[in-house]
Amino acid sequence: EKTLRELADENDVTIGAGVPARSFRQYPDDPTLAQTLKREFNAITTANALKMGPLRPERKVYDFDDADAIVNFGVENDMTVRGHTLLWHKQTPEWFLAWDYTDDQLEAFVRDHIHTVAGRYHDKVDVWDVVNEAVADDGSMRETMWYEAMGEAYLDKAFEWANDVAPNADLYYNDYEIASDNDKADAVYDLLQRLLDRGVPIDGVGIQMHSLPSYQHSREGPEAVGANIRRFKDLGLDVQVTEMDVAYGPDEEFDDRLEHQAQYYRDVLEACLDNGCDTLITWGVHDAGTWLQNRYDVTSDPLLFDENFNPKPAYDAIRDLL
Ligand code: XIL
């Protein structure tokens, strides 16, 4: 039997996992995480290590150890490496939140951050989530610190700064609940159109695809997912599913929950492949490593492998499609 990775490689499909350094460090040389990763996946994403908070414990101190470990693992094992993320309003350092900057200082700071981080990995990170979650749920621009200091032009600048130092990387905008019929998806579509009209060096859009009952539009059927992928593609952008997991709420009683989950993974991958998207990344490898434990009051088995790294029905479902 071929592994998921073998089938993905044969079919020019990219199947990846977002990995937190914590679980990566926990299992570096046992037969589980590292081996499952390199056997089953041909892409890897840094789940937290490249976010500003974990990366910059102090204003002038970068700690690249965790990020290097994940990035180098990906390079050594011939995986597509996704860097997540250069600019996000969450998981910023404590000292940053306490800093009383001017708009100009903030702009210089962000430029320096992006030049430093994207520059360090210019020949290792293949795809960057340059900006994460710039649009609010109602479709307005999210009023982040970046937006307040620079206006919408912060996106233009962020992509240009990344392009300065990592001209060969694919540069992505990444967000959640944008594969649905909703105001936010429309607003992201319009934003991407404006960026392209202004000549911003953006290559693609990442659809997070966290499927949680607390996200209103997270269980969109394959038609809406496919239609949204298609319209992003029609803008001339590449599209990837970047952070998929499938969880259920306490009042969602399914006897066959794992089969339902498998079907949803399959539907999304099918909508992706049918509409010119060739990449699906799950947000973790095995259920014991999910970020959804003790969060949002949802089931904590959202991934392709169970807590002992045994493949689940969802694994078989996406494997069967390849
Ligand atoms: C999550 C991580 O998985 C958690 O470990 C962390 O505590 C919070 O962030 N959208 C994103 C990801 O773009 O960066 C988030 O990752 C999940 C939601």
Image (tube, grey):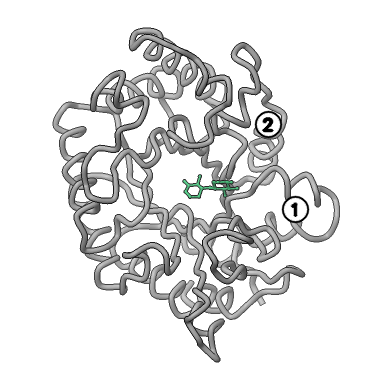
- Left or right, 91 with respect to 68, comes to left
**Circle 1 residue:** 34
Disc 2 under 8 Å from ligand 1? The reply is no
Disc 1 element: helix
Query: Mark 1 or mark 2, which has the lower sequence index?
Result: 1
Considering depth in this image, is 296 or 212 the residue closer to the camera? 296
Residue at image coords 34%, 26%: 159
- As drawn, 241 above or below 165: below
**What residue is at 30 percent from the left and 28 percent from the top?**
155
Q: Amino acid at mark 1?
A: Ala
- In the rendered image, the vertical position of residue 199 relative to residue 216, given as above or below: above
Q: Quadrant of residue 140?
A: top left
Identified by mark 2, the residue type is Asp
The answer to which image quadrant residue 294 occupies is bottom right
Q: Position of residue 215 (x, y in %)?
A: 38, 62
Residue assigned mark 2: 68
Mark 2, Cα crowd under 10 Å, few <14 / some 14-19 / many 20+, is: some
